[in-house]
Structures are given as C-alpha cells and as structure tokens.
Amino acid sequence: MSRYLAKRLLQMIPLVVGLSVIIFLLLAAAPGDPVDLLVFGNPNVKAEDVARLKHYYGLDQPLHIRYFKWLWAALHGDLGYSRTYKQPVLSLMWWRIGNSLWLQIPAFVLALAVAVPVGIYSALRQYSKMDYAATFFTFFGVSIPAFWFGIMMIYAFSVWHPWTAIPFLEGLKLPAGGFNSPGIPTGLPRYLDRVQYMALPTIVLSLLFMASYTRYTRSSMLEVVRQDYVRTARSKGLSESKVVNKHALRNAVIPLVTIIALSIPALSSGAPLTETVFGWPGVGRLLVDAVLAGDFAVAQGIIIFLAALVIVFNLLADISYALLDPRIRYD
Amino acid sequence: MAVLAERIAARAEVAGQGYWEIAWRRFKKHRTAMFGGLIIFLFIATAVFASVLTPYTFDQIDLYKRKAAPSWQHPMGTDELGHDVLTRLLYAGRISLAVGFIAAFTAAVLGTLVGATAGYFGGWPDNLLMRFTDIMFSIPDLPVLIVLARYMGGSVPGIIFVISVFAWMGPARLVRGELLRLRTMDFTDAARALGASDSRILFRHMIPNALAPVIVAATLTVGGAILSEAALSFLGIGIQPPTPSWGNMLQNAQDFIWNTPWLAVWPGAMIFLTVLCFNFLGDGLRDALDPRLKL
C-alpha cells in the first residue's frame, strides 16, 4: 500500500507543477503589475520611484525567477496582500471558506441522499416510468443555469409564495438572501436562525450535483446488474434485496466513490454563482467581488486553494479506489 | 417465418444504405432529440430574422414606458430603461447562440488536432499532450474563466476565446482514444503500404473515422458554452450592455424581482430551453452515430 501511495504521489508531481505554472501565469498576465496599480492616479510618484519599487519587489526580474520566488512564498502560506481589503489574502480567505462550507456540506449530503437511491432504483427498473422521470430530471439539472434557478427560487419562496394562503403552510416563506437575521447573538440561536437562509442556496447548489450523481449511479449500477455473477446470485435463489445490496451495489459503488471524490472540488468552483445570487459571504462571492474590483491577488489566492483541493481529492480518489477494489494491485 | 422474412428485408434495406442514412433513420426515432433540433432551428431562425420580426431595435429606449407589464405593444413587457424585452431577447439570441457555436467549433478543432497528434504519433508526444490535457481538465474552470473574462474586458471574441480554451479537452481525449484504435486497423496498414504520407493517413483515413464522437461532444459543448457565457455575463464580466445577451439581461433582473418578475423569467427560460435542447440533440446524435459511445 505505501509503495502504491508513493508511486501515486510521484505521478502527481507533473499535475502540481503544471497547475502552479498556469496559475502563476494567470496573474502575471494581469493588465498592470501590483506597483502600476499602486501608483495609478497618484501624480506625486516619479518614474524613478516606480522603477525603484519594481526593483524592490523583484518585478523587474525574469518570469522564471519570479515563478520560483512566488512558489516559495506560496508554499510558506504567503498568498499575497489584498489591495482592496487591506489584509493578507490568506486571512481574508480563511473565514470565507468556513462560510462556504455552511452551504457546500449540506448541498453535498443532499445531492447524495437523493441521487444514490434514485439512481439505483432507475437502474433496477430500466425503461420504467420512474426511470424516464429520473433521466429527464438529470437533463433538467445539467441544463438549467444555476443563477437563474436561484432567482426563480427566490421569486417563488420570498416574493410570490402562493401556498402561504393554505393553513399550516403560512410560515413557508424564506429570506431572499443573506447569512443571518440581524440582532441574533452567537451560539445555537444564531445557527438555528441560519438554517432558513441556507435552505434555498443549498438546494440550488446541490441540483447540478444531484443530477450528475444520479446519472453516474444509474450507469454504474446498470453495468453491474448485467454481469454474470448477478445472474448467478439470482439463479441460486437469493432474495432480491440480497442480490442488490450484497452483490450488485458493492461493486457499483467502487467507480462511484472515485467519481464523487473527483467532483467535490467542483462544488467549490461552482459556488461563485450561487453565493452571488443569494448574497452569501463565502469564498466564491469573494472571488467575484475581487475580480470585479480588479484585485487579482485575492482571485489568485482562491484559485490556488481550489487547485490544492483538486490535487488532494485526486489523491483521495486514488486511495479510495485502492482500498475498495481488491483487484487493484499495489506494486 | 413471417418475422424472419421481415428481418431479412429490414437488413437488406439497411445494407443498401450509407452510414449517414442509417444514422438519420436512428436519429428520427429519438423523439426528444428531434424536438431539441426543431427548437434550436426555430431559435436560430428567430435570431437571424430578428430585425424583420420586431418593429423595435435592441437599443431603442422609451423612458415613458419603463418596466411596463406585458401588453400587445410589448408582449414580454419592457425593462428598466424601456427596452422592448422581446426584441432584446431575439437579438440576444444572436450573441448567445453565436458564442456557443463558435466556441464549441473552435474547441472541437483544437481538441481534434491535439488528440490526433497524440493518438497518431504515440510515445512522448502522446505523453506530453495527455499530461497537459489532464492538467487543463483539473483547473477549476469557472473561477479561472471569471478572471480571464475580466482581462478580456467584455469583448465578444475574447469571451469566445476563453470559453474554448477550457472546452477542447473532452474532444482531445475522444479523438486520441479513437486514433489509438484506428492505428491498429488493417486499412491503416494498407494505406501505409501503398506509400501514403503521415498527413494523408491522418486527414484522409483516420480523422474522418474519428469524427462521430467529436460531433456528439461538440453538440454537448455548445450547451456548456452558452451556460458559461450566460454565467459570465450575469456576473457582469461577459458581454457588456447595450449589446444584449441572455446572460446580461439577467444582470439587473434580480433587483427588480419584487415588482417586475417577468424581466427575470424570459432570458433564463431561453438559456434553459436552448441548453436543454442541445443536450437532447447531443444525446440523440450519440445514439444515432455511435451507440457504443459513452459520454
């Protein structure tokens, strides 16, 4: 196992190097370097001061040397300084990431809780009405623009809510956006209050993943159900629940776990839209605000974080695959 | 016996037809794909003939009729500046559909070139190109698109460029896989034995044979590209007003949702329906062109 892991880690090196080079070039390609932006519109700064500052910060050095210096700093947790928020990028990101998790973890759980049973059911009853409904739902989920779905949900639950006329449902209105009601102290009441703000963005964020997980579960299950050993299990008289749970599902889960592990970073990458629509103070909205303000250091810090997630989950997917599938040999 | 005779007749009928005819027969049976194709055709037509279909222009402002409810003069109402929403929707279709088609086509061509080079030559070019493809695949695309689109400053070719830069990897992998398979086929050896050059084998014999999955992937990419453009324009870093796109029409709609919800409904419904139809179309094309294909 440790040799397998070591080999996987070695194979990951090109990915890490490639990603870091691309992300570095992304900021290096920004219109105007940090010093240009700093002195922009300030008539008192002379040209020799600009040159001195650029030399001081090493911006006059060739690109490859700047890359290594940047990489060295990033590896030590220095992701740069935000011009608009006047603080280090890392400390700015930190609590925003925490806020984002308030949406991403429930969204992920919700997506799995719906997708796995629906996917299994529609694979076991292929071409049934339920299966067609599930297939149509997956098309719906991958085709709908998340931000528009969010706006429509806000309209339904915060503006229109016709069902509040029905007794027992009069309380079913939800806030159009935000993170907490004003004036609620910290602790449990604050978290309970937050649930109503989380409901809509969680559903919106999870829809795309619900749809694609349903599709994966269905196709992975379909592949297994056709195998000979499932027919053998049936023909030797095992109950349907045993065939499904013990023989089919266990093998269908192996590719599923890998695909899901690889998709988790995308949950964070897709969040900017949902967080912007609902005014959620997460890391995705920070990215959008920073880019609109031209603060590319923040954007780069967030992209580094997301790329690190990609690398970590790539590795986790490999490990889970090796742990779950005994056919994988470690050497 | 009757069944058998029918089957033989059916096979004879099929045998007399070319690949594309068989594909078309299969495609016609795919109801959602036919529906998708029809709607897309309709949307393209209304976008092309937008200037004939509506008496207004897309930047015509009527400040006396701002945020007007749907009526006979303005079937979809007017927006906060008094633009006719239906007119802008038709003109926005030009931009959104053009961005989708051009970005998907560029991505398909790029992907085919990369995949063909990797699959045909194998060895270190294959290794290098496929590692690069993997890296591009693992980039968190929406955040990077947001940054790059901002650099482009809202120019339409710029937006098309950044979207296609993050869409060529799927076709590249498909073409590479197909070429690895085709490389071992007898007709390739035959062509080489007859003295055909590398480029002739590639462009005459192999790429045409690898085209079916690329067409399917490109169709699905059109939908994805339209979604990306809409997302960027919604955030205010894509296509800039007064040029209308379905995404930037939604940019302010959220603020007016309390009084004029229809402003938010139409553009989003157009994006949703168009992307849904491209996904249906791609699904049908996959079944028709290459039923073995998994995408």
Image: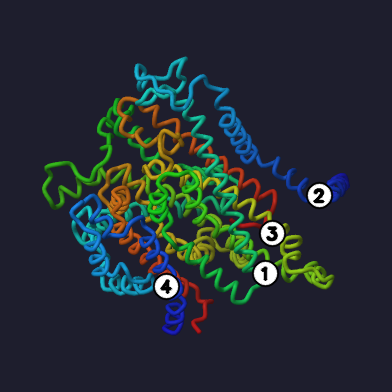
Q: What amino acid is labelled 4 in the image?
A: Val
> Marks 3 and 2, Cα distance to the nearest angstrom?
17 Å
> Marks 1 and 3, Cα distance to the nearest angstrom?
12 Å
Callout 1 and callout 4 share a chain = no
Tag in front: 2 or 1: 1
Secondary structure category for the residue under label 3: helix
Callout 3 and callout 2 share a chain = yes
Q: What amino acid is labelled 2 in the image?
A: Gly
Asked if disc 1 and disc 4 are in contact, CB closer than 8 Å, the reply is no
Tag in front: 3 or 2: 3
Image quarter for residue B260?
top left
Q: Is residue A138 visible to the viewer in this orientation of the structure?
A: no
Q: x and y percent of residue B62 in the render?
A: 38, 19
Which residue in the protein does label 4 denote?
Answer: A17
Which residue in the protein does label 1 denote?
Answer: B120
Work out whether residue B125 or residue B228 is closer to the camera in this orientation and state it.
B125
Q: Specify whether A170 is left or right of B231.
A: left
Q: Mark 2 Cα within 10 Å, few/some/many (few <14, many 20+)? A: few
Q: What amino acid is labelled 3 in the image?
A: Ala
Whichever of labels 2 and 1 marks the residue nearer the N terminus, that label is 2
Q: Mark 1 Cα within 10 Å, few/some/many (few <14, many 20+)? A: many
> Marks 4 and 3, Cα distance to the nearest angstrom?
32 Å
Residue A144 numbered tag: none
Q: Specify whether A143 is left or right of A299.
A: right
Secondary structure category for the residue under label 2: loop
Secondary structure category for the residue under label 1: helix
Q: Is residue A160 above or below residue A321?
A: above
Image quarter for residue A8?
bottom left
> Marks 2 and 1, Cα distance to the nearest angstrom?
27 Å
Chain under label 1?
A: B
Which residue in the protein does label 3 denote?
Answer: B210
Q: x and y percent of residue A119 in the render?
A: 50, 53
